[in-house]
Amino acid sequence: MKSKLAAIFAAGCSLALSSGAALTPEQINALPPPAKHRVDFGVEVKPIFEASCIRCHGRGRGRGGLRIDSRETLLKGGDSGPAAIPGKSAESHLIALVAGTDPDEVMPKKGKKLTAEEVGLLRAWIDQGVVWDPEIGFGPIPPKNLDPRLPEVPAAGIEINPVDRFVDVYFREHKVTPPAPVSDRIFARRAYLDTIGLVPTGQELQAFESSRKADKRRALVRDLLSRNAAYAQNWLTFWNDLLRNDYRGTGYIDGGREQITRWLYGALSSNMPYDQFVRELVDPGAASEGFIKGIVWRGTVNASQMPQMQAAQNISQVFLGLNLKCASCHDSFINDWQLSDAYGFANIFSDKPLEIYRCDAPTGQQAATKFLFPQLGEIAATTNKEERLDDLARVLTCPKDGRLTRTIVNRLWARFLGRGLIEPVDDMQQVAWDQDLLDWLAEDLTAHHYDLKHTMELIMTSRAYQLPAVDLGGAAGTNYVFAGPEVRRLSAEEFRDILSSLTGAGYTSADADIGIGEQAKKEFGAKKTAEWIWNDPRAAETAKAGDIYARKTVHLSAAPEEAVALVVCDNSFELFVNGHKAGSGDDSSRPYMIDMQHWLNRGNNVIAVHAVNAPGSPGTNNPAGLYVYARVRGRSGKKVMDFVTDASWVVTEREVAGWEQPRVSTTGWTPASVLGTGEIQPWGLGRDLIAIRFAKLHQGVVRASLVAADPLMTAMGRPNREQVVTTRSSEATTLEALELTNGRTLADALKQGAAIIVKEKVSAPDLVRSIYLGAVGREPTPEELKTAEGLLVKEPGPDGIEDFLWAMVMLPEFQLIY
Amino acid sequence: MMNRDWNRRDFLKTAGAATLGALTAGYPRRVMADEDARIAPSADTVIVLWMAGGMAATETFDPKRYVAFSKGMPASDMLSTFPQIDTAVDNIKFSQGLERTASVMDRGTLIRSYTAGDLGFILHSRHQYQWHTGYAPPQTVAAPHLGAVIARTLGPKNPAVPAFIDIGQRFDVGESEEEKAFHTAGFLGGEFGPFLIANPADAVESVRPPEGMSPTRFQNREKFYKALVAKSPVGEFGSDYQKESLLRSMDNAHRLLSSPAAAAFDLSLEKKEIYQKYDTGRFGLGCLLARRLTEAGARFIEVTSEYIPFQYWDTHENGHTRAADLKKTVDGPIAQLVLDLEERGLLDRTLIVLASEFSRDALLEGKPDKPVKDQVEVPAKVDEMKFYGMHRHFTDAGSVLLLGGGIKRGHLHGLTAEERPCKTIKDRVVIEDLHATIYHALGISPRLSYEIERRPFYVTRDGVGKPIMELFA
């Protein structure tokens, strides 16, 4: 059978009643006869209206001027006069149209035509006086989940968490007997993943399990939520998906799209209140404007995808759980939003009012600028966009906006329990399975100053969260009854991060620029001021092309344990340490990090640099400069022996044999000319460059959320962030399994991991135990141990470890969150 | 049709890879079109031969007046830079350099009136996106690739061979992000996405154990995994849907990797003399791989000459010289693919579609009545060989070759003007209709839709595609 929805969607054009001429007697005779019984409006007429009329003539729409909201509007009729005349069905224009008297004027134009019986029912209903049950109407449906509502928290039974007090009432009503909460082990695994996106280490888990503290689960959740950096790196994934922020992708390369990574990371790590978070995205400063700026695609795009409309669509979806996509092309067929609503909203982001395009064709009309829910507040009718955005941000986040808070608490619930109080989470026009709970959680968030971590703690410490996982069998039907969290699956990022933490091998450099924290600035900031040097004091402006040689003898009072030089040179350099070449670089815009530790000793050391100023373009300045900051530490990091380029270096233009060797005389070399500190033009090295680079060097394994998608993450469901993604599919697919089984990304990661583990020279049983503990949070059973030992010989080699690790991370017990 | 009485567990035990996904997904829901049941398919497999970068029709399948290079010739004299040649069909001429393909023209239909969309300033990736999804980018939902729609709708032909295989495109060159955007199953879900083989010569690597792992070790690893799964304490975690589908996906992958069908990926198993006939480079070997995979039971295969900005068919200069070289790499393999499939009795049920995102012209950018901003400087007088050729993007008339799969043999569809502008003057074909024709050959209605975010997403844009019925035999 053809879907009704499909047919209606295809119609896509307006139905208008043309002026109705009176029917001839022949035409009247040809009408289906009226039904002979007393017609029941609710049972017999309402379904006909709903199936064939309301899409264009109800719910706020009035094609051809006709609205079938109520008896009054029907009788009043449209552009061609009254639609029905009580008692006179043969003279009622509506009947002529639905009966198809004029084949060119049949209603509905497309979609389900009325049968003769249905026309007969309508005739009888009109003849019997158009009896209309006033309880039934087809006017606009008021928005759901908009007004704040604070239900009273049910009296406490055994449970004191307000969430459970609501859920207990729900359970009683639905005759659900909740089983006992999950074990500490399973709880800890869930809680770690949901906060910081990692699983507990064996030690953390043992400590938690053996703790006798009464309130230890709450204490754990609090502790985890307070690990700000780990929390931010985990939740970055969720918000990147929602705000379609990425590190590479369409638009970035030609300025048609802007990252908000730094802002987002800062907002998450500081737990920015949600109302402020939304305000800063909707009425942004430079750091967060990427979200409403959207993606400017090159070439001509469909009018429904202009940046202002993207802003309207994305704000609607992400913050209000509302689909405005259909309505940005034509009046929506899936909800009540109309083209003028979408344009009215998009106007807010536009420098001048937008011309309305219907199905990508210009209409010559404009929409009045307005927010979707005018009842929440006014948007100034002004040409000043800043003012409008300011108004929008205020209206959207005012305490009267219960849609904003319900939408986010529902998203959190869905994230933690696998399925929302309302599902799908982007359709907030629906009723929740526990509406009181949703309403209360939303208001509680407002009352706690929009502190998302507060709501998270509330949910995660509830018994509802701690119930054993249930199997919903993939797609749950409409008769969903909550009985516990759904079995979930690790995300691509979680999978990768846990693997990294099991082996110590993982991503080593981030694609995300998340800025640098105060602590890192303090720890890795420069202890000395490096200066640009050359052999000509005007070199920052221009210098002659050619080679120079620079040297410095450095005295180290302790053996260096760490010695890395950051070198920038315009244009290229080679660095020698005590006569050994330690590194080189030829990109003048890039700081090179060169490890010198191997060649440095306690006492005197000679650092020598061969620097080249390449010929510039004729007629332009050709600046030259060399900049070195060496971070040198000894005695477990306590002894600071950093050195830098400055006036104490000596330079020459003449290449003498062995110039880089320690024992060569520097007679005839001249003191280096200092050009200025790092920030000077044309190079302008940022103030935090040293700290950023060295912090990066020390950050160890990088979280997957900070790295651009690779084939493994893509296969595991990390989305291309060109569209907003609010729910990732957790479906296991064959292509994904292929990537896991023979893909290079995972194979390389396992190889690296095994190479690290093999060096630790642990015995097979110890290795099996520690990986089981780290991966699935438990000791292996004796049988598992025996099986694993069968694969691993007594002193496991890299191949055996690799294969063991692979099998472990493929286990359902590892990949699923129970 | 699926038997509704099957219980899920039985099905999981017997189902193949993609059908499993189709069953379990439930989302997006498939909405059948009325006529779905009535279309008798004339093909089971589709091979798209993608001439990436904009292949000039006047230099390949739609030759016009030939003017040889002479120093100082007016640029406006350039229509075709090659003489025309006969094909196996009297009224169809090709351009020199396509002699072998010309000899199999009697196995199919040539469309000369393919008209690309109006997407403003010409960008290859956006036109490629539109050709492959049927929708102009961007879309508010992630649009699926033609191959993904077919994989989702029909499932694999052989459960051990991925239903949608994409050969020859690397994703770390050129506009890779834009390429990735349409090489995807979009909202249909990862199960139906492309199985990517960047380099056909290395195809076998995608279906064998990871590099450096012996087959024995690979089998042992699998055995060990199975043993660990079996020993895993089931009591606490029970058996559930998620776990079953995870294990099943692993089984499917392993089955593929150890299946006899995997041998189809290994070009070294091909007879030497046949291999050499295809060995003109990546594209040629891609055609060989496509043939082997068709034999093994693939459903949808795309072989691309590869899109890299300003490379291959993206001729912004030296158009003549480069077209001559390109034809050498595609001509033999295309013909050989047709002949090999025919010899194996597979051509009748395999639809080969050779296409490009648009055509080229020496002077016109866009369409005669809708010109867009030029991207290539063309001197009025051609003094150097590098200016001899088709360097601008022409969207009004391009060639599409359809072979096998129930398509008329030796047929010509569409007519273009003999003089500039060489526009379409008869039987215009747009992407919606071309897709509808491909779908029709497979028994799929152009009005079939999948429901996403409560709206129907039609397999041809808004369901408007109409199959070109006169192309069918």
Image: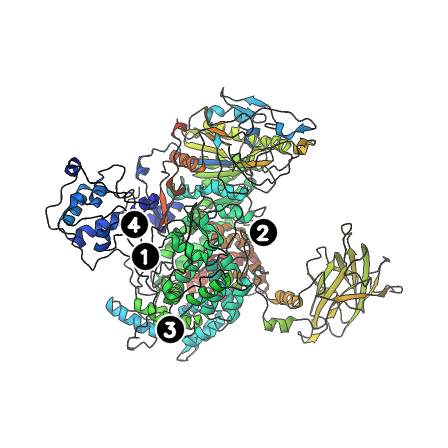
Q: For the residue marked with disc 1, what is the amino acid?
A: Ala
Q: Is residue A388 visible?
A: yes
Nearer to us of marks 3 and 2 is: 2
Looking at the rendered structure, the secondary structure element under dot 1 is: loop
Q: Is residue B28 visible?
A: no
Nearer to me, A263 or A699: A263
- Are dots 3 and 2 on a single chain? yes
Q: Which residue is mark 4?
A: A65
Read off the chain for label 3: A
Read off the chain for label 4: A
- Are dots 1 and 4 on a single chain? yes
Tell me the quarter of the picture where residue A187 sits: bottom left
* Sequence-wise first label, 3 or 1: 3
Q: For the residue marked with disc 2, what is the amino acid?
A: Asp
Gap between marks 3 and 2 measured at Cα: 44 Å
Q: Which residue is mark 2?
A: A254
Are the residues at dot 4 and dot 2 in contact (C-beta closer than 8 Å)?
no
**Disc assigned to residue A444:** 3
Q: For the residue marked with disc 3, what is the amino acid?
A: Asp
* Sequence-wise first label, 3 or 2: 2
Nearer to us of marks 2 and 1 is: 2
Q: For the residue marked with disc 4, what is the amino acid?
A: Gly
Coordinates of residue B130 in the picture (x, y in percent): 47, 42
Read off the chain for label 2: A
